Image: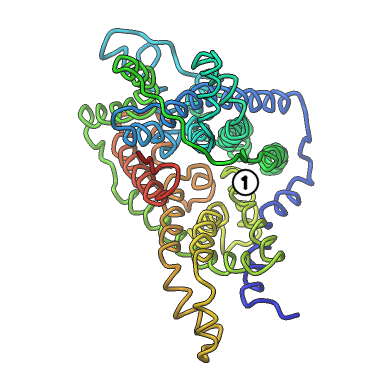
Amino acid sequence: MRWPFSYPLALVIALLALVPVGVLMSLANGDATFFDQHNLKVLTNTLWLMLFTALGSIAIGVPLALMTAYAQLPYRRLWLIVLAAPLALPSYIGAFTLYAAFGPGGEIDQLLGVTPPRVYGLAGASLVMTLYTYPFVLLTTRAALVGLDGNLVNAARTLGMSLMASIWRVVLPRVVTGMAAGALLAAMYALSDFGTPAMMGLDTFTRVIYVEYNAFGLSQAAMLSLQLLCVVALVLFLESRVRGTKESPGRLLRLWPKPWQSALMLLASLPVFLLSIVLPLAIFVLWLVRDGTGDFNFSYAWNSTYASLLAALVAVILAVPVAHAALSGKAGRLMERVTFLGFGVPGIVMGTALVYMGLQLPFLYQTLALLIIAYVLRFLPLAVGSVRTSVESLDPRMLQAARLLGASPKEAFCRITLPLTMRGIIAGAALVFLESMRELPATLLLGPTGFETLATYLWRVYEAGYFGRAAVPGLLLVFMSGLGLALMLVGERGSDFDIKE
């Protein structure tokens, strides 16, 4: 049986995706400590952070999902965009600004003379992670809610049940899977994040791996990375077991709150938006007005842009054969799933593995090429998903007609498939570009000597304590993240973001 033309390339790409795990396993075979008292503390901190993030995301995300799905509020689409906006920002932006704003001597204390409690440690990290991951629960729960038949709630109300009781006993049990899916995504984000625990001074796997790397404990860093990957695998397994709610379509439930009730709901959701979006922007603008640009070298912005553009270009080139292979048979789908491994590997783990690979291959060590490899392995699934979606939408009869008219497979691909999937290719490249711009731990570990990006410069400023110099890179990162949100909303035409009256 002859393999499709995309299989050989997809197989090579899938094998490359396995390289970091293989490197970590070979590196951890030395004198690294498998498990000790310190590792137990790190594991405990990591699990607590995941648990508090998941619970906090549910506590915030579910009520907001109910509000945006059912309540007929003024400017409903705008409120959905506003409440989903924190998902577009890197959490370390929020960690940096909340750390600088709260506590004795913080920006709020200096401006208003009011001393809010310090945001630090497990409580601070949990707060930050919750603020920037609750949109996962908001969106997955809302997607489940809009697919429910509201007539069951009306029936419960007819039988004498109050509105709150009917939501609690009729609606929420039917969207548990959506809530669980969002909570697991939030926990996964908390598990793999580096910047927030590091800035909050919380010893989680990602922070300790970075400390071990800086102390030249590469073998121990690899062992910790493998332990972290075991937790990642467990979360991914749990997430794969969550299935969406299947229910016969019906009439969407609509609630018409009174004006004072609408105002109360919007007022209750306002603190979340203020803490996650307005406060970071206000702090950066304050620093910009007070300290100016701080002699910021705009070549750092070019470094971020240049490296991210290269990563986006390479990623979409590799994504095309993988996406086509995934649609050609079971073997291709398996290859696609293997490439998704990189997206589940935290950036700090990817960086640790590739540092060691660079040491074995001196022509790669401390080069931009190695950093690009890390970006591509991490974010290739974003490009693959986008390209695959566009390929799936093609009418296969067009390719059959081209072949009947004498076109070779290569000619049919170049003249029909490629032009018609260009929109998905561009969207995938844009997603890889934006994620690469924001990537912190892999850039810290793999960036060439003297190569600073917006993310790494923000980290250096935090370490040095010169917070005022973070204004320009912080605002630029917020701006780029806003572009990412706009891209996401444009790509959601006809999806849950499309609120129909």
239 or 356: nearer the viewer: 239
**Residue at image point 56% right, 36% down:** 189
- Within the image, what quadrant is residue 44 found in? top right
- Left or right side of 258 for 383: right
- Left or right side of 227 for 122: left
User: Taking 257 as reference, is 82 above or below it?
Assistant: below
- List x then y, in percent, for residue 200: 50, 24
423 or 248: nearer the viewer: 248
490 or 147: nearer the viewer: 147
Badge 1 crowding class, 10 Å Cα cut-off, few under 14, some 14 to 19, many 20 or more, is: many
Residue 221 appears anywhere in the view: no
User: Taking 166 as reference, is 326 above or below it?
Assistant: below
> In the picture, which quadrant includes the N terminus?
bottom right
- Left or right side of 8 for 251: left
- Within the image, what quadrant is residue 210 found in? top right
User: Taking 355 as reference, is 97 above or below it?
Assistant: above
Residue at the limit of the structure toward the front, as seen here? 158
Inspect the image, locate mark 1, and give the three-letter code of the amino acid beneath it: Val
- Residue denoted by label 1: 345
- List x then y, in percent, for residue 27: 73, 49
> In the picture, which quadrant includes the C terminus?
top left
Q: Helix, strand or loop at disc 1?
A: loop
Residue 134 appears anywhere in the view: yes
Count of all numbered marks drawn on residues in the image: 1
Q: How is the image coloured?
A: rainbow
Residue at the limit of the structure toward the bottom, as seen here? 406
**Residue at image point 39% right, 37% down:** 458
- List x then y, in percent, for residue 224: 70, 38
- List x then y, in percent, for residue 315: 50, 61
